Image: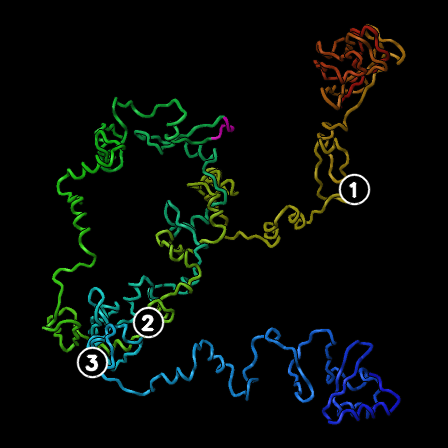
Amino acid sequence: MTRRKNPSEFDAILAAATASDDLIIWWDTSAGKMYSITKSEFLTMVTAGSGDMSTSTYDPASIAEQLVGLTAAQTITNKTIDADNNTVSNIGDEELKAGIDAAKIADASVSNTEFQYLNGVTSAIQTQIDGKADSSHTHTLTDITDSGALAALDTVGTSEIDDEAVTLAKLAHVPTNRVLARSSAGSGDVEALTLPNFRTLINVENGADVTDTTNVTAAGALMDSEVTDLAGIKSLDTSTLQVKPTEGAFVDGDKTKLDGIETGADVTDETNVVSALSGATLTDAGTPQATDKVLVQDSSDSDNLKYVDFSDFSSGTTVDVVSNVAADRILGRVTAGSGDSEELTAAQVRSLINVEDGATADQTGAEIKAAYEGEADTNAYTDAEKSKLAGISAGAEVNAVDSVNSQTGAVVLDADDIDDTSTTNKFATSAELSKLAGIETGADVTDTANVTAAGALMDSEVTDLAGIKALDTSTLQVKPAEGAFVDGDKTKLDGIETGADVTDTANVTAAGALMDSEVDADIKTLSLPANTTISTFGASLVDDADASAARTTLGISTASKTAEGLVELATTAEIDTGTDTTRAMPIDQFVASKRNIEWIVFDCVDPDTDCAVGTNIAGDFVSPIAGTILQSDSSPFYLYATNSTAGAPTGTMVVDVNINGTTIMTTNKLDFDATEKTTTTAATPPDLTTTSLAVGDIITIDIDSVHVTPAKGLKVYMGIRQ
């Protein structure tokens, strides 16, 4: 609302509101809502003169109340409707909802709880109250009508007594050192039990002690004092253990022996086996057993030595290792102890497998029943006995007691009426009751505190409970005296052959050691003079790890083109490669290399001239060098010929080489196959009969045959190593 400029309008508003808490209501045309404010609040706002009420220091939202429009529904909460100035009409039952607070009715002295007591009243309350007797009154016997068990005052059943209505004081007196319970068979009256009887009833021994060693042991638990390594057992994780090998536990000395065996030691190595068998004395093993082994040489596996046992002969082989069996006999053994197979008769087999002669698996129930009842002393349960048993009522008793000591009905006896002198179960003494009182309520030998106090272990204290419960110490072994096995030992052991022998020649040699047989006898007796000393220089040389270090000690440097020193000699292959810059070239290796080859080329026929059959077609050539004529069937070729144009289409051109008038080749000479321009591709390479060439030898070339269409041009190449 915006403050208006004409003060007379405010005066008219204030004149209409007589009391300070009267409401002034205005309509906000911009918001379409109606607001109210008290007269005193309105005066404060006008005096402040803050202009726009909605944006001034005055907050209309904190004191103004939004009212509903004329046609809309609105919930009125905590508002007082003045009966003098306001009227609420047209409100019926359907407009009033349930749950009106009773404090709003009359003088508000009745609470909702008190008002709710009227629920269920079916008639005038005062009339009902007047018909009730006073809370304190008496009755005569005649006032009690015959109603079930109350007809006689000396007979009161449990239905007439309220639950928890009878106090301990109303019970019969209990003798000293007695406990109310019942140990007699079946349900019945409560009995005053002696302490021994009560301990028997609750299964607690006299002076029961859950920390007692005997009790803990009987409970299947271990006392701390029984465990040698208590901390180790508590933290034991069976997943880190291994089952004892079937062939037996490791014993002291095994680990030392294992450490002395090389990794991957193999006694099945052929050298080892042959060495072990060489010179061995063989004895007769007698009748072969199924587990006996025979060495064989496996031709399908590089003739490696392997073994087979006699059990392998029982399938897929033609070897008959079992003697003939008589008719109507079965192989087995009935003689005590293990031993050879025996030929058993049918009767012996039936006795062995506990089956009677002619036994069948298809007997009827009647046959089985007749056979059973026909046996002596079977005490078979008959139909007549079943009928007799059915006629006896459940819980039937023989010689039931109707009275005790002339008392009949519900007889009440206390412990003083009973003499336990000759009874097996005795009354408890004061000392026994006192001891029983010292046992905690609900004493539990499985309680953590009790078990711990007893020096035993709770399940929760064990890291690997399932493993500990299933632990069979017979499958474990004591840690070897030389130290426990560690990770990697089993892998190492798996890689060692069974029966590995570190003294075996092959194993010793593989280890880089010498066998006695490899050493001269004088070495064993070698004795240096007493005054023998090794200089510092000599010791340093001996200590050098490799040749390079030794050369440094000796002051030997690597040789070069300008300095003397140590140089490595090149091999023929390295000389052939011809790229090495550091190695020296020995004369013999140079002579044997490709670098020592001289080539002689014979230009026999011009490139445009047809080749023709003839001898000494190019004239004599006098050799100026001596050496060895080389020949190779594959690249590089040292003796071959070429054409400028290949011959065709069929036939073979054959070229021969002569020294001093004699061919140097067999019938396999230099051949040109059809359409080929070189002899290097011929199907048949040349074979030399002479390779020696001397200075002054006369070399001549012959053409023994040509193609149908002769080839053109001919050159012959000869490689000679001097």
Q: Amino acid at mark 3?
A: His
Asked if residue 62 is positioned above or below residue 210 in the image, the reply reads: below
Give the side of residue 393 with respect to residue 557, left or right: left
Q: Residues within 10 Å of mark 3 (few under 14, many from 20)?
A: few
Give the residue at x 75% y 37%. Answer: 580
Which label's residue is closer to the chain start, 1 or 2? 2
Q: Amino acid at mark 1?
A: Lys
Helix, strand or loop under label 1: loop
Asked if residue 565 is positioned above or below residue 93 in the image, the reply reads: above
The structure's colour scheme is: rainbow
> Which mark identifies residue 442?
2
Residue 461, given in percent of the width and then of the height, sits at 42, 65
**Foreground disc of the pair 3, 2:** 3
Residue 488, given in percent of the width and then of the height, sits at 50, 50
Asked if residue 45 is positioned above or below residue 650 in the image, the reply reads: below
Q: Which residue is mark 1?
A: 561
Q: Quadrant for the C terminus, please.
A: top right
Q: Amino acid at mark 2?
A: Gly
Helix, strand or loop under label 2: loop
Tell which residue pokes out farthest to the right in this image. Answer: 608
Q: Which residue is mark 3?
A: 173
Q: Is residue 303 magenta?
A: yes
